[in-house]
Every structure is written in C-alpha cells, then in structure tokens.
Image (spheres, rainbow, N blue to C red):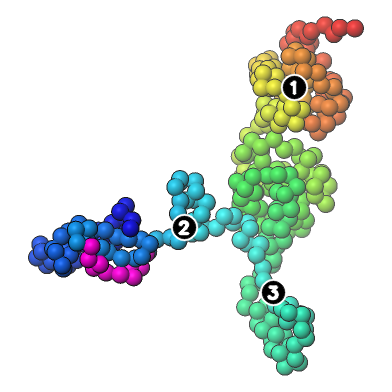
Amino acid sequence: MGFGRESMVEERKENVNPEDSEEERELRCPNCGSTRLIYDATRGEIICANCGYVMSEREIDQGAEWRAFTPEEREKRSRVGAPISRYGVESLVTDIDWGGRDAAGREISLRKRIEMLRLRKWQVRARAQSSMERNLAQAVIELERLGAQLGLPKAVLDRALDIYKSALDSNLVRGRSIESVMAAAVYAACREMRLPRTLDEIALYTRAGRKDVARCYRLLLREASLKVPLPNAADFVPRIGSLLRLSGATIKRAMEIIDQARNAGLTAGKDPAGLAAAAIYIAALQNGEMRTQKEVARAAKVTEVTVRNRYKELVKKLDIKLPVSKK
C-alpha cells in the first residue's frame, strides 16, 4: 500500500457540498467511523487505516503515467505546453501523394485513385495559398538549413524568423532572393544577440553572394528599424580560443589586450575578428602557448595578412613586451 498519497481523499473533502453538516463533510469509514484513510495508487483504492475496510476501489488517477523526481526530469518528460520551436512547426507540410500505391506498396484501384485525386484537389483549395505564405514556407526551410550549417541556437533562429517576417510584411522581400534576405536576417539576429558570426561566414553557406547579403542587411537596418549593437572583438575571443584549445588564462589575457586597444582608440574601423585573432596570437606568445599565425587566421576565418597587420599595430601602439624566442 502507498501511505504517501492522500490527494484523492482531500479532493473528495473539498468537493462536498458546503451546506452539509460537519459529519457529512468529513469522509469517514462506514465500518468503524475512522477518518484515517489511505489512498493506494497501485490498486486505485481508498482504505481505512484503522480497520482495513476498502471504502472505494478502481479510483481513476488523474495524474501522469510517468514519475519524475527533479524539475528537470519533469520538464523533459512532460508532453504538454507550447511548441518546441516556432519555425519547426511552420515548416511541417503534409500532402496527398500523386502515386497510385498504398502504404504497403500495392496498386490501388482506378476508383480509389480518382478519389485520392479529388481529395488532393480539395486539399490544395482548402489550404491557404497566398504568395506571402508560400514565401514564408520557403524561408523557413532556408532558415533551418542555415541554422544546421552554422550551429546556431534556437533563440537566434527565432529572432531571425521575426526579422524576416517584419521584412515580408513591409514588402522588402519583393524583387530579392529569399536566400539573401534570410541570410541578412540571420546575420542581424547574430549581431543583436552578440553571437560571433561574420558576414563572410554566413554568406559562405548561401547561394547568394556576399554583396547581395550585405545589401539586404543594410536594407533591413534602414527600413526595418533594427537596433544592432556595434561589433565587439571581445565576443570573438572565446570562440577562437576554444578552437585553438587555449587555456583560460590566455583567453583572459586576450580580452585584456582588446580592452586596452579600445581605450586607446585602436578598434575603430577594424575588423573585430581580425582584432580578436591578433589579441589571441599575442596572448598565446606571452603565456607560452605557441600558435602560428596560419592556425590563428584559420580559426578566426581571416587572412594571415590581417592577423599580421593587427598584431604589429597592437604591439607597437600598446607597447606590449613579448618574450624573446630562443634560437
């Protein structure tokens, strides 16, 4: 018997009519009159703890059929609530196939095939087929592909979809490719949430060129009233450091170098990824974690020339002392 669950008994007490007498309000055992009742969840019975009389059996358990012992486990096992992803739900489309076979692969009769064609026709007519909805369906597919290629979190994808919807409502997508506008929306969402992704990196996974993506991004900033913060080189440092497998002390030192460069006014007009790569290279030299400029440039997705120029400028303007290499 389970002695820990008496919720069914308490629920019965609450559902009693308040106009009844005190004796009728309180649930008692009809055999001995005791109020010490136990709910057995295994058998679905209400049992008197005094004499063992079974007052009710086959009670319906209104709770879930699973058990959870932590809030995380309860949230994971729960099957109710809002959809997991807005952009995933909108991309679900079910169509009646044109084929003349059933689920088992057997050919269907001519009469059944004509019926399926009629159902398919009414399905197409019943479904909303406006140009904006068709455009949005294609954009969602492109967004899912970009998110998988770039490894973007769900919050960024949701924000990118909101930006694209606002552009679609403002008629900014007309005359432009869906790929370029969606790539620009993804880049704007990454900039808003300070996720280190460059425009070149996003344009690399789109069929549209970098110029088209940049042009659409400037259009979104101008027409969609987006407030995008200025790029910060410090946002790129943890990502580059993790790709190079550098220690936390080296990453912290690179952040300090970028702060010094910002206070000295050296970050204006510079590529944030290039500045982060140069700071990482200097910090690695100072902490004895040798990395070549080619390795750093590859991790930051910039050229070696950019790393070399920013490295020389930071060392000279900030008067950074580097360890002398042993020959």
Magenta highlight range:
52-61
Which mark is first along the chain, 1 or 3?
3
Secondary structure of the residue carrying numbered label 2: loop
Measure the alpha-carbon separation of dots 1 and 2.
50 Å
Q: Amino acid at mark 1?
A: Ile
Query: Which quadrant of the figure has residue 277?
Result: top right
Q: Secondary structure at mark 1?
A: helix
Task: Say which amino acid is labelled 2.
Answer: Trp
Q: Residue at x 25, y 63 (%)?
A: 47
Q: Amino acid at mark 3?
A: Asp
Front: mark 2 or 3: 2
Q: Residues within 10 Å of mark 1 (few under 14, many from 20)?
A: many
Q: Residues within 10 Å of mark 3 (few under 14, many from 20)?
A: few
Specify which label sits upstream in the sequence, 1 or 2. 2
Examine the image and state in which quarter residue 26 appears. Answer: bottom left
Residue 155 rendering spot, x and y as whole percentages: 60, 46
Separation of marks 2 and 3 at Cα, in angstroms: 35 Å
The circle on residue 95 is 3
Nearer the observer, 294 or 137 = 294
**What quarter of the picture does the N terminus occupy?**
bottom left
Q: Residues within 10 Å of mark 2 (few under 14, many from 20)?
A: few
Specify the quadrant that holds the C terminus: top right
Where is residue 238 shown, x and y percent of the image?
68, 28
| Residue 216 forms part of the magenta stretch | no
Above or below: residue 237 compared with residue 133: above
Badge 2 or badge 3: first in the primary sequence: 2
Give the number of the disc on residue 66.
2
Mark in front: 1 vs 2: 2
Left or right of 312? Residue 3 is left
Numbered-mark total: 3
Mark 3 and mark 2 in contact (Cβ < 8 Å)? no
Residue assigned mark 1? 280
